Amino acid sequence: MILKADRIAYLIESREPPSDPLVITPCPKIEEFKRSGSASMDLRLGCWFAMLRPSRAPILDVGPTVSESLTAEALTKLHYVRFGDKFVLHPRAFVLGITLEWIRLPRNIAGYVTSRSSWGRRGLSIATATGVHPGFTGCLTLELFNSGEVPIALYPGMAISQFFMHWVDTCSEKVDRSQLAGHRRPFLGTIELDEFARKLLRL
Amino acid sequence: MVRDLLAEADKIVDRSKIQQSDESLVEKCCENLTLMVPAENSGGSANILNAAWKGWLDQDFFADPTNNERRLANLREVILKSVEILEIESKLNDLP
């Protein structure tokens, strides 16, 4: 069941249970949000962007002979854009952004982040890996791509995506402590071949 | 000598009107930080930094033990985000 604005607002305001609350900070104007009757919460663009540096790697290869140059630090360049300044995303350009909001989901709520339709219709896609697991804490990395014909100016603080939340049917004891949790800047993460894939590669 | 230095440091702090920390607000910051959530309405960077110091000293600072496995890295992220949120709060409060 997807949570509506009044339920989300109640959970944010009550901070219940204190040991495992839903937290979204900075928080929207709660009364206004409650009245909206929305089934999602708008998320804003943060100040950090990470651009991939194509010159550093001729190919993205996660095979067994991955070179050192493919580490996240080597592959990305971080940019800080102050409030009031803009980041221009050119046509066909791709950059990682981050939500302004830090989100903490309790163990019984999961979520997913999607584009706002008004931006999507202008050619800006926000995220492709949209699921957020119960227990996640941190800012959400956004995969921003301009599929339109004109450059798009991105301003930190503007509402850029929407976040849907829903209950999960059983409250898990294990929570999301993946490498993607607990970050305030865009995070590339690492890709490693699992045992299944390694076995197949040996065939 | 040490006493003189401390007295001189106190004088400098008094003269420069550096904001002092407030223990109740430091506790409030700590409540958020232990949940791996940045501090909100912290009242100033002094409170955030004092809460950060408590987190740095306490090996079991985070309520969820799995967060203590990367304690300092996690602490750095929530502290720096707390400072960013403080900036956002002060910008919003300046607006008419």
Image: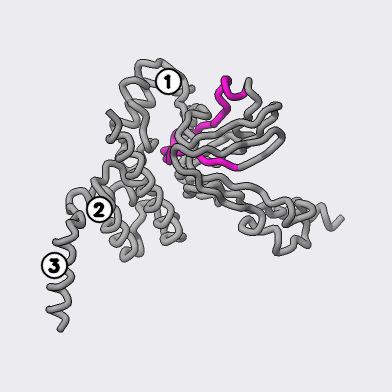
Residue under the point 63% across and 20% down:
A121
Q: Residue at 34% of width from left, 30% of height from top? A: A11
Q: Are marks 3 and 2 in contact (CB under 8 Å)?
A: no
Q: Give the letter of the chain under mark 3.
A: B
The three-letter code of the residue at mark 1 reads: Lys
Residue B60 image position (x, y, % from top left): 35, 61
Neighbour tally class for label 3: few under 14, some 14-19, many 20 plus, Cα within 10 Å:
few
Q: Chain of mark 1?
A: A
The quarter in which the C terminus of chain B is drawn is: top left
Q: Do tag 2 and tag 1 residues touch (Cβ < 8 Å)?
A: no
Residue with the mark numbered 3: B11
Q: Secondary structure at mark 1?
A: loop
Query: Which badge, 3 or 2, is on the more N-terminal residue?
Result: 3
Query: Are marks 1 and 3 in one subunit?
Result: no
**Image location of residue A129, percent across then percent down:** 62, 37
Q: Secondary structure at mark 2?
A: helix
- At 13% across and 67% down in the image, what residue appears? B11
Relative to B10, residue B51 above or below: above
Residue A114 lies in quadrant: top right
Q: CA distance from mark 3 to mark 2?
A: 20 Å
Camera-nearest label, 2 or 1: 2
Residue under the image location 15 percent in, 73 percent down: B8
In this orientation, which residue lies closer to the viewer: B6 or B14?
B14
| Left or right: A42, with B31 as reference point | right
Image disc number at residue B47: 2
- Furthest-right residue in this view: A203
Write the start and end of the magenta stretch as one range. A96-120
Q: Amino acid at mark 3?
A: Lys
Q: Secondary structure at mark 3?
A: helix
